[in-house]
């Protein structure tokens, strides 16, 4: 090389990465035809690592600090290039910076439902969502297994691979856990820990450390959720007599707001109570082997009080005594019944 050509060459005397944009995990210092000045400085900030690559091989790795690039600070590179202690010429090498900051609040979720066996419902399809955090722990592994020689490697690119590991591991964990869906909500913390323990070695293969993993939601498809809601409702209505009492109690305030007030409700309340008792008696008789009450008998029992003012007044008095209606509602209903009676 002539002296003129040597003078025209450009040398890099400061190597650093300021991380101008968020979401970049690996960044190659732009070299083009430039060489690194012997004795130049390398600045590696906290939450960073720097890797020197010579002829495709990792030569040296630097943690946070400021370094003067000499044969003393580049021992492996010196060995690869067969330098002696007096060699002080500029040198060519690729330099990669890696962000080792903790990547927090990263979201994961199952794109498609996971089918597993369930003790209560047989086969169910689940969807799960949550959060996780990670960081680059071994830059050598990350460089050779993930980022390679790219000028820039982003968080979104690595997370596409990590999410595939997450879903595969979660499917295996849920499938082998034998935890019924109805118990999963109470065991989300244990489930999260079990999945994290299985994921950590998988992440480590790529030089990534899994810091935290959480399952925040496990849900069923809409049609199966409706079936569960129906089953829960049927369980709540197991005692028909109590269910009828509940309906009566909740209907009184609504009836008081409608035309006719509580007075118009008297007959229907009596009919509802009699029908509820008839249904409860019928269910009990069927369980004991007896014949349940016929619909005609139940209808006759319900219709009788509706035509008898005395019976309606007696039923209203019973409701008043049980504090199911107020004194004012009783007086109003009583006045309307008597008014109809006398014309």
Image (cartoon, rainbow, N blue to C red):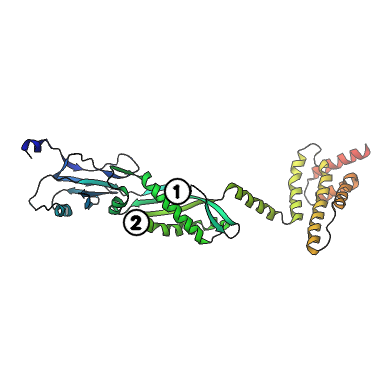
Local secondary structure at mark 2: loop
Quadrant of the rendered image containing residue 91: top left
Residue neighbourhood size for the residue with mark 2, other residues' Cα within 10 Å, grouped as few (<14), some (14–19), many (≥20): few
Q: Residue furthest bottom?
A: 288
Tag shown at residue 271: none
Residue 148 in the figure: left or right of residue 39: right
Rendering coords of residue 64 (x, y %): 25, 50
Q: Report if residue 154 is visible in the image.
A: yes
The answer for how far apart the CA atoms under marks 2 and 1 are is 20 Å
Q: Which residue is mark 1?
A: 108
Rendering coords of residue 171 (x, y %): 48, 55
Pick whichever, 18 or 123, lies toward us: 123
Residue 192 in the figure: left or right of residue 156: right
Residue 202 in the figure: left or right of residue 274: left
Residue 172 in the figure: left or right of residue 73: right
Local secondary structure at mark 1: strand
Q: Quadrant of the C terminus?
A: top right
Q: Residue at x 90, y 38 (%)?
A: 340
Q: Residue at x 17, y 54 (%)?
A: 76
Tag shown at residue 205: 2
Pick whichever, 99 or 261, lies toward us: 99
Against 309, is 276 above or below?
Answer: below
Pick whichever, 27 or 4, lies toward us: 4
Rendering coords of residue 342 (x, y %): 93, 38
Residue neighbourhood size for the residue with mark 1, other residues' Cα within 10 Å, grouped as few (<14), some (14–19), many (≥20): many
């Amino acid at each position: 090389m002539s002296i003129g050509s040597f003078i025209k060459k450009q040398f890099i005397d400061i190597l650093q990465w300021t991380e101008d944009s968020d979401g970049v995990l690996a960044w190659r210092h732009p070299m083009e035809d430039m060489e690194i000045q012997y004795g130049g400085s390398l600045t590696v900030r906290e939450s960073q690592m720097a890797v020197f690559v010579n002829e495709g091989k990792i030569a040296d790795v630097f943690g946070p600090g400021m370094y003067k690039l000499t044969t003393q600070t580049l021992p492996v590179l010196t060995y690869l290039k067969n330098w002696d202690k007096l060699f002080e010429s500029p040198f060519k090498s690729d330099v990669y910076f890696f962000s080792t900051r903790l990547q927090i609040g990263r979201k994961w979720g199952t794109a498609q439902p996971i089918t597993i066996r369930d003790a209560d419902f047989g086969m169910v399809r689940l969807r799960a969502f949550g959060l996780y955090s990670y960081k680059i722990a071994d830059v050598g592994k990350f460089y050779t297994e993930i980022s390679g020689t790219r000028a820039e490697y982003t968080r979104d690119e690595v997370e596409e691979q990590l999410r595939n590991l997450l879903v595969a591991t979660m499917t295996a964990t849920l499938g082998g856990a034998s935890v019924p869906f109805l118990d999963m909500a109470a065991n989300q913390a244990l489930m999260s820990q079990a999945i994290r323990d299985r994921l950590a070695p998988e992440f480590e293969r790529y030089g990534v450390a899994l810091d935290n993993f959480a399952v925040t939601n496990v849900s069923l498809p809409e049609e199966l959720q409706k079936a569960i809601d129906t089953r829960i409702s049927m369980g709540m209505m197991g005692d028909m007599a109590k269910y009828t009492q509940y309906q009566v109690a909740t209907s009184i305030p609504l009836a008081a707001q409608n035309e006719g007030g509580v007075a118009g409700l008297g007959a229907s309340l009596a009919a509802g109570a009699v029908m509820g008792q008839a249904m409860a008696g019928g269910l009990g008789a069927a369980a004991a082997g007896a014949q349940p009450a016929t619909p005609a008998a139940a209808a006759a029992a319900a219709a009788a009080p509706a035509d008898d003012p005395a019976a309606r007044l007696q039923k209203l008095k019973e409701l008043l005594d049980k504090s199911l209606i107020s004194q004012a509602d009783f007086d109003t209903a009583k006045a309307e019944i008597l008014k109809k009676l006398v014309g």
